[in-house]
């Protein structure tokens, strides 16, 4: 278990910490209350996975909006997934009101398989820790950023540059 902080207070991350070169673990998340998605649903595409604690917070909002803007510039061989533990209908409502139309939002609320498999499930809060994963078309991790402080912004430029090198 890795350690991180929320406003300087320690939190515990559950699961395996991944590194560049690792095979991306599979996961099962929800598209909506009844439909699920997994890594294999995006086979053959470069995947930027933006992990946020909750879309209804300032940094998560900014992070998702930023990657939505970038998605239009990255081409059809790239998919940007935003994963949180927000309920699917809350994600859908937020996207509608925010005008988010290029990023795919997915929910890990049900069984936390993404959070555990990617080492980002916060034990104390049952939320996901802010992080970024760039996975190539062969499902190998090419970029990872685990933030140590939940309220910090990720390195947007580095993540987008990692994607650009793969397309």
Image (cartoon, rainbow, N blue to C red):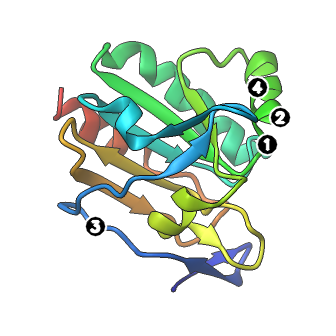
Judge by depth and name the residue closer to the eye, 157 or 28: 28
Cα gap from disc 1 to disc 4, whole angstroms: 9 Å
Q: Nearer the viewer, mark 3 or mark 2?
A: 2
Q: Residue 8 placed where, x, y %? A: 70, 80
Whichever of labels 1 and 4 marks the residue nearer the N terminus, that label is 1
The residue that label 2 is drawn on is: 90
Residue placed at 69% from the left, 55% from the top? 53
Cα gap from disc 1 to disc 3, whole angstroms: 28 Å
Mark 2 surroundings: few (<14), some (14-19) or many (≥20) residues within 10 A: some
Cα gap from disc 2 to disc 4, whole angstroms: 5 Å
Residue placed at 71% from the left, 14% from the top? 99
The residue that label 1 is drawn on is: 87
Q: Residue 80 placed where, x, y %? A: 45, 31
The residue that label 3 is drawn on is: 19
Judge by depth and name the residue closer to the eye, 118 or 102: 118
**CB of mark 2 within 8 Å of CB of mark 1?**
yes
Q: Is residue 109 left or right of residue 41?
A: right
**CB of mark 3 within 8 Å of CB of mark 2?**
no
Q: Nearer the viewer, mark 1 or mark 3?
A: 1
**CB of mark 2 within 8 Å of CB of mark 4?**
yes
Q: How many marks?
A: 4
**CB of mark 4 within 8 Å of CB of mark 3?**
no
Q: Is residue 102 above or below residue 157?
A: above
Q: Residue 28 placed where, x, y %? A: 53, 48
The residue that label 4 is drawn on is: 92
* SS at badge 4: helix
Q: Residue 45 sits in which quadrant?
A: top left
């Amino acid at each position: 278990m890795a350690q991180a902080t929320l406003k300087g207070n320690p939190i515990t991350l559950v699961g395996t910490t991944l590194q560049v070169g690792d095979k991306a673990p599979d996961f099962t998340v929800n598209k909506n209350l009844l439909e699920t998605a997994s890594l294999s649903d995006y086979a053959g595409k470069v995947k930027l996975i933006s992990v946020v604690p909750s879309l209804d917070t300032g940094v998560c909002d900014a992070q998702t909006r930023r990657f939505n803007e970038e998605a239009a510039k990255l081409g059809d061989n790239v998919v940007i997934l935003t994963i949180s533990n927000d309920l699917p209908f809350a994600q859908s409502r937020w996207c509608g009101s925010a005008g988010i139309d290029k990023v795919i939002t997915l929910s890990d609320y049900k069984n936390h398989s993404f959070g555990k498999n990617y080492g980002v499930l916060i034990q104390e809060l049952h939320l996901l820790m802010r992080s970024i994963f760039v996975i190539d078309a062969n499902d190998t991790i090419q970029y990872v950023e685990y933030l140590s402080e939940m309220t910090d912004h990720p390195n947007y430029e580095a993540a987008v540059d990692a994607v650009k090198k793969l397309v």
